[in-house]
Amino acid sequence: MFDLHRRSTERQRDVSSQRPAPIPSSPDRPSARACAAAADTLCVSTIAFLKEIAVKTSLIAIASSLLLAAPAWADETADTSPSEADQIVVTGTKFSGDFGGKSGIPIDRVPQSVQIVSADDIVAQGAGSIGDLLRGVPSANPGYSRVGAYQSFSLKVRGFLADQMRNGIRQRYYEDVDASALSNIERVEVLKGPSGVLYGQSAVGGIISIITKRPQDEPAVNLALSGGNYRHKMLTIDMTGGLASGLAVRVTGEVERSGTFVDFQDMNRINAGFSLRYAPSDRVTANLVAEYVERDTQRNPGLPIVGTVLNNGGAALSRSLYLGEPAVDTMNADAPLVQAWVDFALSDAWTITPRFQFQEFNTSFTQIRLRAPQPDLVTINRNGRTGREDDAYTIAQLDLSGTLRTGPVTHKLLLGYEYDHERGRFTQYNLTNVAPINVRTPVYAFNSLAPTRSFAFDSFYNIEGHALYAQDQIDLTPRWNLIGAVRHSWIDASDGPYGGAPANQAATGSTIWQIGSTYRLTDALSVYAGYNTGFDIESTGGARTRTGAPLMPEESNQAELGLRYRSGGLRGSVSLFRIKRVNAVTADPVDPDYSINAGEQRVNGVEVEGELQISDGWRISAGYAYLDGEVTRSNDGIAGLRIGDLPKHSFTARTELEIPGTPLTLRGGVHHITDRVLVDGSAVVLPAYTLADLGLGLELKPFRIDATVRNLFDQRYFTASGNGFAVYPGDPRTFTLRLSLGF
């Protein structure tokens, strides 16, 4: 079975029914292996943190020494003023620039709803993960907290899973290692709905586009220490400067040594980023981004349905309860990522840009999983597995962009080619002596007993992909813009026993397209409409029909109509849309042990969001989404029922007030979602909840203090885990204090 289908068990598990299922042959994503250089003790001071950074990432140490000399070198350069390409999108102008780092489409002309979170917003909100950032985006589901495994598998937009990009290139599980790796993020752009024309196979819900921090010519250093309850401790660094004429560098990094609100679960992680920008002439600009993430924690299995969202006849279960096996559970992962691209200006009108990305995903794991309860409702059956995974992904792209005129009409063209090369190995053993556990008096068997195991499989997978794509932005008039795009992909996949010949091979292809238009009714008001399609092979790449033929890629489409307004201190938008997931995998009515492409789901929705600058120091933003989701076709007995983990109503609001005549800023926010079913067609309902947070900022240059209280009223709530056996507890009230020094 192709690895893509194995992964889809985790990514698409929200479509599973509520009824218990046997251990899948395509298991959940594994936990990860411990990194050999992991620290043996907690870092309790700035000096200890810095020493650990130097030991674990020589990249930071080397680049830091370079940056210490950067001011002197910068003084010797002839011109260190920032170029136009260096301008960073910040709060107040964050709706300028092009989407995604490569599309060439101005954000205010994208014929889809787009919301943006800036680096300043990350600090102001006290965000601890990508999921936290999505709480301020209408129709986005922030998923479970970082105590769960691989948060990215739970992030949704408009009712469906969302994929992540980095600097315009699709990520391949890099984001799964550590959802808390925020130190190298300049902004996060959320594009809603299928968006695969430029970016390839992607989830139905949309794209979470991450733009990393860029090197600046002017030298700057920022150091930050964070602390809080549950033994939270973290050090963050961000340094940049010019090294020579046309050459600038930036180094970012983060080390965290924390506990969590869950018993036995700690959070030890590190991420580092190194960026170079070299512009030897006006016609050539080269960029290099190297990042590394590493996470070491326990694989929290969550909490059972009974005792949390359903009554088990006794007291409700504590959010801190750990129902795995703390003596053996591991979730350790590491991944390096390298990106490079060079813009060559062929003329004043045309540019050619080669892009390259290499990434690994390396893990070893031991995992306990909760299954159905026994008749007493307090004894929970469990199973487990152990193994390792090693993956390597390469993506290469070549883009040609430019403008031309045909009579009075101006065309802005983008033509491209993409090559994907993926190699992976997955080895698994099933644990054979995992005992049930009583949630009232848990006894951890592996504290005194060694786990035993039986071999499950050792397999490889290979993927070769090619794609051609084209996009045309047409300026019909100064007020009227059209966008059209098309992409065709060829994908060859194979898998089998490691070291042997392929057991399965399949070649699939897909053509997707997009068309949209924006018309400026006035200087402040514009209307847009668009229709776009997408495809994804993660749920179908390895599955087979009963005849042995491969399944076709899953497809999606979205129609959207919206208004945007921006004038003075007021900005807002409203959109109406229908998004559909088609060709979804569902049971074969002739033989339910096999699948066919016959499933379909749809969401009809309305979104309203806006921001008002009441005065120079007072800003309010708010958003509302109505999402009506339904399984419209299925052979699994759930047609006509609700889509899982999709609230019908959600509301979010934030405010920020600078106290006149003082260096103090007050902040607050509220996030509300209504109830939603656990998984597609489930009878289990997750209750509605409302979260509030408060914060303050104190600017005492060169120091800055930011304090945040999240879940102010300690709301008890639970989030979907992706299957019908367990939920994850939401974060309780947490307090974070961040002290930064910038110069």
Image: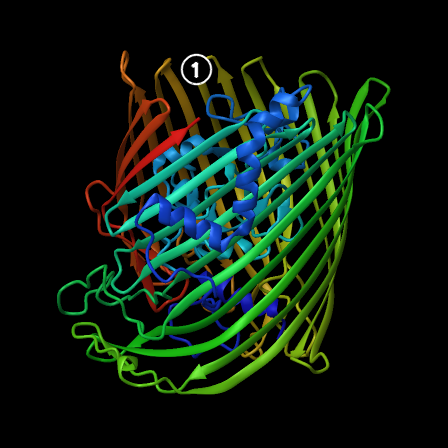
Report the front residue among 589 and 367: 367
Q: Quadrant of the C terminus?
A: top left
Q: Residue at x 25, y 56 (%)?
A: 261
**Total number of numbered labels?**
1
Report the front residue among 120 and 689: 120
**Residue at label 1?**
569
Identity of the residue furthest to the left in this view: 314
Q: Residue at x 74, y 38 (%)?
A: 342
Whether residue 236 sits left or right of residue 411 in the image: it is left
Q: Quadrant of the N terminus?
A: bottom right
Residue 246 higher or lower than 597, as above or below = above
Colour scheme in the image? rainbow
Query: Image quarter for residue 62?
Result: top right
Percent x, y of residue 108: 58, 26
Query: Image quarter for residue 723?
Result: bottom left
Percent x, y of residue 623: 39, 32
Secondary structure type for disc 1? loop
Percent x, y of residue 103: 67, 36
- Crowd tier of the residue under label 1, counting other residues whose Cα lies within 10 Å: few below 14, some 14–19, many 20 or above: few
Whether residue 361 sits left or right of residue 569 in the image: it is right
Q: Residue at x 48, y 62 (%)?
A: 333
Residue 439 higher or lower than 518, as above or below = below
Residue 391 higher or lower than 52, as above or below = below
Res. 192 in view = no
Whether residue 361 sits left or right of residue 694 in the image: it is right
Residue 312 higher or lower than 84, as above or below = below
Percent x, y of residue 177: 48, 57
Res. 354 in view = yes
Kind of residue at badge 1: Gly
Whether residue 481 sits left or right of residue 325 in the image: it is right
